[in-house]
Image: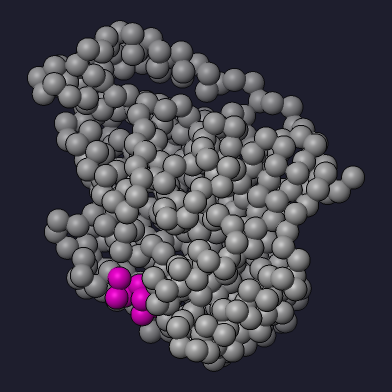
Amino acid sequence: MNKAALLNAFEAAHQCALKYQRPVVAVSSHPAPTLDPLVLYETHRQGFFWCAHSPALTLFGLGCAWQIEAAGAQRLADVNRQWLALCADAVLDGPLLPLLLGGMRFDAQQPCAQHWAPFADASFHLAHWLLSEDNDGRWLRCQCVVEPDSDPAVLAHASLAAYAELFASPHAPASPPQVIERNALPAPQWQAKVANALQAIDSGDLSKVVLARHIEYQLDATLDSGAVMRRLHERRSQAHLFALHRGDSCFMGATPERLLSCQQGNLSTHALAGSARRAVTPKEDQDVGSALLADIKELHEHQLVVQTIQQGLSSIVSQLHAAPQPELLKLATVQHLSTPIRAQLKERYTLLDGIQALHPTPAVGGLPGATAMSFIRHHEGFDRGWYAAPVGWLDSRGNGDFLVALRSALITPEHCHLFAGCGIVDGSRPEDEYEETQIKLASMENALRLSFN
């Protein structure tokens, strides 16, 4: 790392900070072909890890140069305002922009469970050191916020010390912990919740509601998030991977669903609803997929999601286009109906406006949206926290990518919480929906390698 270049960038940012009497972000970026984001995440088990496809991007962020926490209905607007203000006069040494990483709670109105306490309503971090890998290779950027009273030399010294920490020796791999106790709502009781939802649908109050399950493991040691991510990475198929750390807690997953991405104002998303298991043989798997593509109930549920995404985006985009027919998205244990959707952001609107317009989609909430959210609050029986909520990144020019945090786990000291859900519509059968959640839980359970004494 070039100390002189780093100091020059911080001094230039300091001059801007003095001139405008406000913080200025400085970014110094350089090629780093020998560094591997996944290896660094395995080593540190901290910060932020991201591995998405279409387009391919892997990120590892360590340390926190700046953070935004916001609460309530206007949380994303607050994040957007503070982020744009910070980046207004960014100083760039190299080609890469400032990049912010984080996410938000599924439902800001839901009381927060103790295990979700480290995760705010909305929380975004500017990583001090950020390694990225895409089609342009691997790049390492140092991101620093320079205040009017900052000393650039002190900031450069601290940044180089943090850089040295990137190269810490890897931890010796630990054996997966043993399960002391597993707590989950018994199948008959969860299926009774599905029956209640079907009654509400039959009465006309709802057309769809998504109900999730929460499984808590008490462990004899803390899970190694790096080893879990390595296993998820090895069998990720078409899933996107993420891990976000807050103190001693880590929220991580392998989700099939992108909520919304933006590149130069071009939005991309997909409707994802309708599920079936993967089969053992290619012929059987093809038959299961063909049956899913022809299933009236699953197609109806899927089309509800397509229509709602189109309606949600319609006021902030132009050139909105959805594929005429769904395709199959095949993951390790489950396959889904997926319809690609593209649009162009109108002027004055941002990616976070699109997130605000879409979340929660019917794929994680239901229809009508407000009624479904009320049903979830009163009947689901637990705090989803950041499960099924947007997690992702955005840069200083409005580009970014957000996933829906599904197929996920919250790892805390000597505990692990798993989450999975499914959409309930007219024609759903409680036993089938329970089995669907079992299939969805399998990918994380396999990666966690939890076993009883």
Residue 265 position in % (x across, y down): 23, 57
Q: Is residue 108 left or right of residue 252?
A: left
Examine the image and state in which quarter residue 370 appears.
bottom left
Residue 277 in view, yes or no: no
Q: Residue at x 46, y 13 (%)?
A: 161
- The rendered magenta stretch, by its main secondary structure, is classed as helix
- Looking at the picture, does residue 193 appear above or below residue 447? below
Identify the coloring.
Answer: one colour
- Estimate the x, y position of residue 325 in percent, counting from the top left: 43, 84
- Is 411 in front, or is 335? 411
Residue 289's quadrant in the figure? Answer: bottom right
Q: Is residue 233 left or right of residue 86?
A: right
Task: Reply yes or no: does residue 155 show up in magenta.
Answer: no
- For the residue pair 133 and 82, the one nearer the viewer reads as 82
Q: Position of residue 202 (x, y in %)?
A: 53, 89
Can you say which quadrant of the picture contains the N terminus?
top left
Given the current orientation, which residue lies at the most extreme left position?
19
| Stretch in magenta | 306-312
In the image, residue 249 sits, relative to residue 170, either above or below, namely: below
Q: Nearer the viewer, residue 19 or 171?
A: 19
Q: Dividing the picture into quarters, in which one does residue 426 lie?
A: bottom right
Q: Quadrant of the C terminus?
A: top right
Residue 392 visible here: yes
Residue 239 locus on image (x, y percent): 56, 59
Q: Nearer the viewer, residue 424 or 196?
A: 196
Q: Residue furthest right?
A: 453
**Up/down of 228 relative to 352, above or below:** above
Q: Residue at x 61, y 84 (%)?
A: 428
Residue at x 9% of width, y 19% of height: 19
